[in-house]
Amino acid sequence: MAHVTEQNLTDVVLERWQEIPDPRLRQIMQSAIKHLHAFVREVEPTGAEWFKTIDWLTRTGKMCTEKRQEFILASDVLGVSTLVDAINHRVPTGATPTTVEGPFHVADAPERGNGENMTEGAPGEPLFITGTVRGLDGKPLAGAVLDVWQTDGEGLYEAQRDVTGPWMRGVYRTGPDGKYVIQTVAPIGYTIPMDGTVGELMNRTKISHMRPAHVHFEVKARGYNGVVTHLFRNGDPYIETDVVYGVKKELIVDFERKPAGRAPTGESVATPFNVVRYDFVLLEAQAEKLRGAA
Ligand code: BEZ
Ligand code: FE
């Protein structure tokens, strides 16, 4: 083995870490070592700074439980979650883009009929979200499933409320014409959890810790690739500075504010309400396979 010097150390380590039978793991470790060494060479941390980094990582790990994942939050605010998502969900123009899932999805949301209210009495101004789910060729998709979750009009998710039943979430299905109607309340922007190690770091920056108002969706249809995505409220003060870099221009929608009157469900609403119109466009699973092979 070569005796190490500051100059040759990276090459010595890279050579040692060639000895990995799994080629993908070898590729990942080679790249990780190259970038990590380059980072250390550029920053030249003091010993105290390096121990502080290790301490931050240790405390971040200790914060993680079944209900809280501080490492994912760190990946979110550094844009890594969005980058991994983008790399893994490249879609052609016209197809609905994906964005990060976030930590607030709860499995097994209640089934709701088309037009049913999913708020369970949550505060906020009424909102109707309606449109079709269709393929890239325009074909409406009957029986597509939309799993929907969001904050209420005070910016809180079910996990942040003292509620026992489902809160602000539901599973809708499109009718034979591919149409769906969701009855909910308008979400507002909210802060990511700031009481952990990520908050500690964010508080040493001038970066906004807010997410713009949005509604989360997982949309699936037989024979098509599902999408996990959000719709974001146009004009939200945080639309340009989403702390997790989730906003894509195709996902920004107008919340049309209407006076009291007839809603898209056909019922009469006694207060002003909002309407969002959005068509989800899914990619046929087979088309995706062919694109990958091309
Ligand atoms: C969310 O949209 O729910 C979310 C996403 C990433 C971090 C925190 C919250
Ligand atoms: Fe969210």
Image (tube, rainbow, N blue to C red):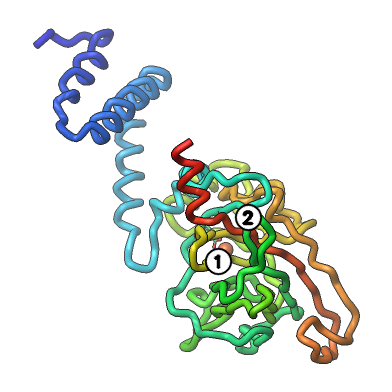
Residue, disc 2 = 96
Position in image of residue 129 (x %, y %): 72, 73
Callout 2 environment at 10 Å: few (<14), some (14 to 19), or many (20+)?
many
- The answer as to whether callout 1 falls within 8 Å of ligand 2 is no
Whether residue 19 is situated above or below residue 80 in the rendered picture: above
Q: Which residue type does callout 1 highlight?
A: Val
Per the model, the C-alpha gap separating discs 2 and 1 is 10 Å
In x, y percent, where is residue 47?
30, 27
Mark 2 vs 1: CB contact within 8 A: yes
Q: Quadrant of residue 277?
A: bottom right
| Residue 33 spot, x, y in % from top left | 29, 26
Instruction: Left or right? Give the position of 83 relative to 17.
Output: right
Q: Which mark is residue 219?
A: 1
Graded by Cα atoms within 10 Å as few (under 14), some (14 to 19) or many (20 or more), the crowding at tag 1 reads many
Q: Secondary structure at mark 2?
A: loop
Amino acid carrying mark 2 in the image: Thr
User: Do we see residue 81 in this rendering?
Assistant: no
Residue at figure coordinates x 88%, y 76% from the top left: 258
- Residue 30: assigned label: none
Residue in the foreground of this view, choosing between 34 and 178: 178
Mark 2 Cβ and ligand 1 under 8 Å apart: no
Residue appearing at x 42%, y 53% in the figure: 72
Image position of 36 (left or right of 241): left
Residue at x-position 30% and y-position 56%: 62
**In the image, what residue occupies the spot 56% across and 50% down?**
244
Q: Say which quadrant the N terminus sits in.
A: top left
Please identify the residue farthest to the left as the structure is shown. Answer: 1
* Label 1 secondary element: strand
Which quarter holds ligand 2? bottom right
**Closer to the camera, 122 or 226?**
226
